[in-house]
């Protein structure tokens, strides 16, 4: 079994409700740091769990109530954020490097399974 990273961005206070729903769902998951950034959480889900199943476990009510958005990479997450605050070249290089590490890590996990 390997793990896939999911980033969730939403309105303030969504973290506790998402955690509660996931704990009751029976889906295999590992919570990441709750302080990735304000109103952003990180989860690892079992690679056999689809994003659709993950969202269903959280429930449509919670997804819509907290305007949850789901991202597979840091790059996708950062592109969704306000473009009026662009990254410096150094920050862009760091995000790119972190994304490459994540992709390589996920490949390694899949190949070792």
Image (spheres, helix red, strand yellow):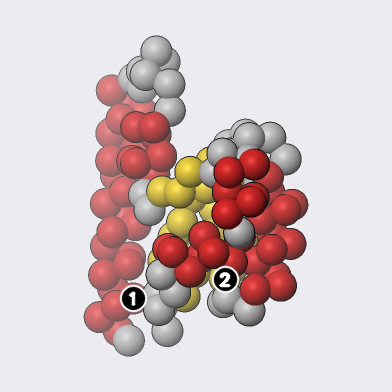
Q: Nearer the viewer, mark 1 or mark 2?
A: 2
Instruction: Identify residue for label 2.
Output: 29
Provide the secondary structure element on which disc 2 rests: strand
Q: Residue furthest top?
A: 84
Q: Earlier in the sequence, mark 1 or mark 2?
A: 2
**Residue 109 visible, this orientation:** yes
Q: Are marks 1 and 2 in contact (CB under 8 Å)?
A: no
Relative to 58, say whether 90 is above or below.
above
Report how far apart the C-alphas of labels 1 and 2 lie in the structure. 16 Å
Q: Secondary structure at mark 1?
A: helix
Q: Residue at x 31, y 48 (%)?
A: 99
x and y, in percent, of residue 24 in the image: 71, 72
The quadrant holding residue 109 is bottom left
105 vs 68, nearest the viewer: 68
Badge 1: residue crowd in 10 Å (few <14, some 14–19, many ≥20): some
Question: Could you say which disc has been placed on residue 35 in the image?
Answer: none
At a point 28% along the width and 59% down the height, the residue shown is 103
The residue that appears at 32% across and 86% down in the rendered structure is 113
User: Picture quarter containing residue 74?
Assistant: top left
Quadrant of the image containing the N terminus: bottom left
What x and y, as percent, mark residue 43?
Answer: 54, 59
Viewer-nearest residue: 86 or 97: 86
Q: Quadrant of residue 102?
A: bottom left
Left or right of 103 on screen, residue 7 = right
Please name the residue shown 72% across and 40% down the image: 13
Query: Is residue 40 something that shows in the picture?
Result: no
């Amino acid at each position: 079994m390997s793990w896939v990273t999911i980033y969730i961005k939403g309105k303030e206070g969504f973290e506790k409700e998402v955690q509660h729903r996931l704990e009751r769902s029976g889906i295999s998951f590992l919570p990441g740091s709750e302080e990735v950034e304000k109103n952003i959480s990180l989860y690892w889900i079992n690679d056999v769990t689809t994003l659709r199943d993950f969202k269903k476990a959280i429930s449509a009510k919670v997804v819509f109530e907290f305007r949850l958005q789901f991202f597979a990479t840091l790059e996708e997450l950062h592109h969704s954020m306000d473009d009026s605050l662009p990254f410096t070249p150094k920050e862009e290089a760091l995000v790119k490097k972190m994304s490459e590490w994540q992709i390589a890590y996920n490949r390694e996990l899949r190949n070792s399974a």
